Image (tube, rainbow, N blue to C red):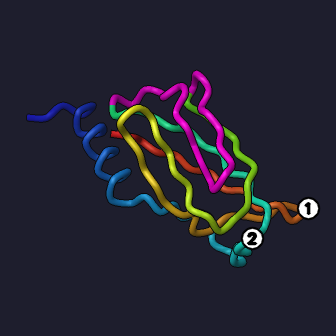
């Protein structure tokens, strides 16, 4: 029998590998070149935050803090890439939500395995 914690780690790893494209709240389509603020949290296969993971969108990049969190101001329409040591994941922000000044905001949570 596989423990509950082990099952969670396995499922998280499979989801990160199988579903790299992130989908968010539905609504109006995000412009291809608008301003995007991407934020989120990156976890390791053990479920612990990954400090120092790199999140890149085009030429823009940010590193995660001690809690695995990051905020990156960039342009919409480009793929994101998350990397840490020998692990990496890529995807596109499929949808986001606009705020009152026209800036699009999206969140991502990934488990790298």
Instruction: Examine the rendered structure and indicate whether residue 107 appears above or below residue 99.
Output: above
**Magenta residue check for 58:** yes
Image quadrant assignment for residue 75: bottom right
Residue 63: % across, % down: 61, 33
The residue to which callout 1 is attached is 101
Range drawn in magenta: 46-67
Q: Residue placed at 63% from the left, 56% from the top? A: 58
Q: In terms of secondary structure, where does tag 1 sit?
A: loop
Disc 1 crowd rating (10 Å Cα; few below 14, some 14-19, many 20+) is few
Quadrant in which the C terminus is drawn:
top left
Residue 88, position as x, y percentages in the image: 41, 45
In-front residue for pair 23/4: 23
**Residue 50 rendering spot, x and y as whole percentages:** 48, 28
Q: Residue at x 62, y 68 (%)?
A: 95
Q: Is residue 78 left or right of residue 112?
A: right
Locate residue 56, reporting x and y percent.
59, 48
Q: Quadrant of residue 54?
A: top right
Looking at the rendering, which quadrant does residue 35 occupy? bottom right
Q: Helix, strand or loop at disc 2?
A: loop
Would you place residue 59 above or below residue 68 in this image? below
Query: Which residue is farthest bottom?
Result: 28
- Residue 90 is left or right of residue 71, and the answer is left
Check residue 33 in the rendering and tell me which mark sits there, or answer none: 2
As drawn, the residue found furthest toward the front would be: 59
Query: Among all residues in the image, which is located at the extreme left?
Result: 1
Q: Which label's residue is closer to the chain start, 2 or 1? A: 2
């Amino acid at each position: 029998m596989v423990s509950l914690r082990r099952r969670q780690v396995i499922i998280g790893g499979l989801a990160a590998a199988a579903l790299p494209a992130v989908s968010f709240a539905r609504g109006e389509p995000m412009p291809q070149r608008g301003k995007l603020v991407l934020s989120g949290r990156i976890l390791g296969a053990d479920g612990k935050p990954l400090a120092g993971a790199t999140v890149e969108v085009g030429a823009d990049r940010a590193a995660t803090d001690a809690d695995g969190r990051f905020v990156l101001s960039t342009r919409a329409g480009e793929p994101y890439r998350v990397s840490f040591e020998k692990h990496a994941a890529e995807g596109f922000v499929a949808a986001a939500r606009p705020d009152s000044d026209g800036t699009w905001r999206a969140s991502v949570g990934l488990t790298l395995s």
